[in-house]
Amino acid sequence: MDLSTATKATFRRTVETFAPAKSLPQKYFVSPEVFSEEQEKIFSTQWLLVGHQSQIPDAGDYFVQHVIGESLIVIRDKSGEIHGFFNVCRHRGTRLKEDACGHASAIQCPYHAWTYGLDGRLIGAPHMDEVPGFDKADYSLHPVNLDLWEGFIFVNLVPKRDGYLAEEEGAARLRSEATARQRSGDFISLERWFAPLNGKFSHWNMSILRPAKRIEYDVKANWKLMFENYSECYHCPGVHPQLQKVSPYDSAENDLREGPFLGGFMKINPGKSLTMSGNACALQIEHPPSPGYGAAGEQEHDKENTQRVFYYSIFPNMLLSMHPEYVMVHQLWPQSPERTLIVCDWFFHPDAFARKDFKPQDAIEFWDMTNKQDWHVCELSQQGISSRAYEPGPYSSRESIPAAWDEYYLRIMK
């Protein structure tokens, strides 16, 4: 059996596994109670994408991120390390930073001028030396768990101290099986969480990429509909005629089929790119041949990789799209059962910015158009699902990844 035959056989087995699956019941898209449960069981416990290290290249650079009602400061200190802190002064609880991003030599409270170093240590507290027993070392900013994966910044709101859960000190359970359900009370380090992907994307050099554009979309649909939409191209012929001309909808092959990491690749027609002009818009992101792509895990070659786009969903709020000359990333932030904020960033090789043939807008306009097409049908889905006539429908043979995503989601929600 040759590799292509093995690939097709694997794909068929995946299809057969999920063929009987149906879409989620209505409550998962409209219920305030389910939405509240998601905030508690998913967004309060999982590693969440908040940005990329290129957003804060210099010491003192920071941005503020809102996560399920919490305001966080993500900042780079003088040694180059990136920290995450709750945006709360240790004196009277005042919000420290109001701007969405900026630069600061220190973090100073606008109320009583308590001042913190870029590493979160309290370094100035006017008149507090008159208070018996006061020690600045006891009042550093409260940290949030923060770590990096391939240059992307993730945070986790689970409280812990010295590697142990605050509520279960001395009994932390750190598990490496990312496909296993995270039990209540567990904390998994980012390194262990991403262990199944070790080395898989390293050759894309995503840590050195630079952002060219950010667009935010306010979508009137449940966040899960965006994940399900992203995970299949069954809808592409009717919804994305421009995309379909360049990347055939039936060319998909998946190599991650269960758990929190799902997806694979689609082919790009020879000599074409996913841009408005159909031509490459930037310097190719250099990467050597690597094993592991495609359902059979065969060794791929540079020429083949220039004719593929890779799509992966990373639970619960990251959509990662890797093209030959750029990377596009979506962050999903649920606002209500029927509304989602989506933050989309385009990244390019740093050397591309100085070249005359650099045309990032060619790719940005293409995907802004495609994104809006997706968000529109997601909003139509939300409207229909809200009807009393809605009932779960069967997934097609080309929707095995949405079915796998639903399965993992329900496992987490148990």
Image: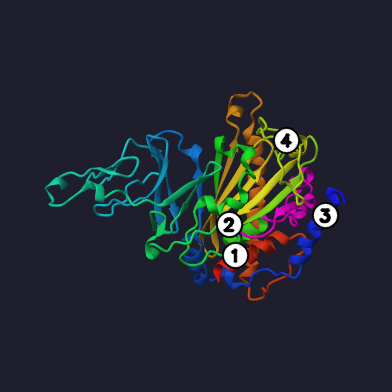
**Which of the labelled discs sits on residue 277, or is there none?**
4
Task: Give, as a three-letter code, the residue at label 2.
Answer: Phe
Q: Name which of mark 2 and mark 1 comes first in the sequence.
A: 2
Q: Position of residue 335 (x, y in %)?
A: 50, 59
Residue range highlighted in magenta: 231-260
Task: Give, as a three-letter code, the residue at label 4.
Answer: Ser
**Left or right of 165 in this view: 125:** left
Query: Which residue is painted at 35% across and 37% down in the image?
Result: 104
- Provide the residue designation for mark 3: 8
Q: Is residue 259 magenta?
A: yes
Label pair 4/1, CB-CB below 8 angstroms? no
Q: Position of residue 221 (x, y in %)?
A: 58, 61
Give the quadrant of the C terminus. Answer: bottom right
**Which label lies toward us, 4 or 1?**
1
Query: Which residue is painted at 66% across and 30% down in the image?
Result: 283
**Which of the labelled discs sits on residue 315, or is there none?**
2
Task: Give, as a three-letter code, the residue at label 3.
Answer: Lys
Q: Label 4: how many residues lie within 10 Å, few (<14), some (14-19) or many (20+)? A: few
| Nearer-the-camera pick, 4 or 272 | 4
Asked if residue 221 can be seen in this view, the reply is no
**Left or right of 11 in this view: 401:** left
C-alpha separation, residue under disc 2 versus residue under disc 1:
9 Å
**Which label lies toward us, 4 or 2?**
2
Query: Which residue is painted at 70% across and 38% down in the image?
Result: 275
Q: Name which of mark 4 and mark 3 comes first in the sequence.
A: 3
C-alpha separation, residue under disc 4 versus residue under disc 3:
32 Å
- Provide the residue designation for mark 1: 409
Task: Give, as a three-letter code, the residue at label 1.
Answer: Tyr
Label pair 2/1, CB-CB below 8 angstroms? yes
Q: Position of residue 144 (x, y in %)?
A: 40, 52
Q: Is residue 397 magenta?
A: no
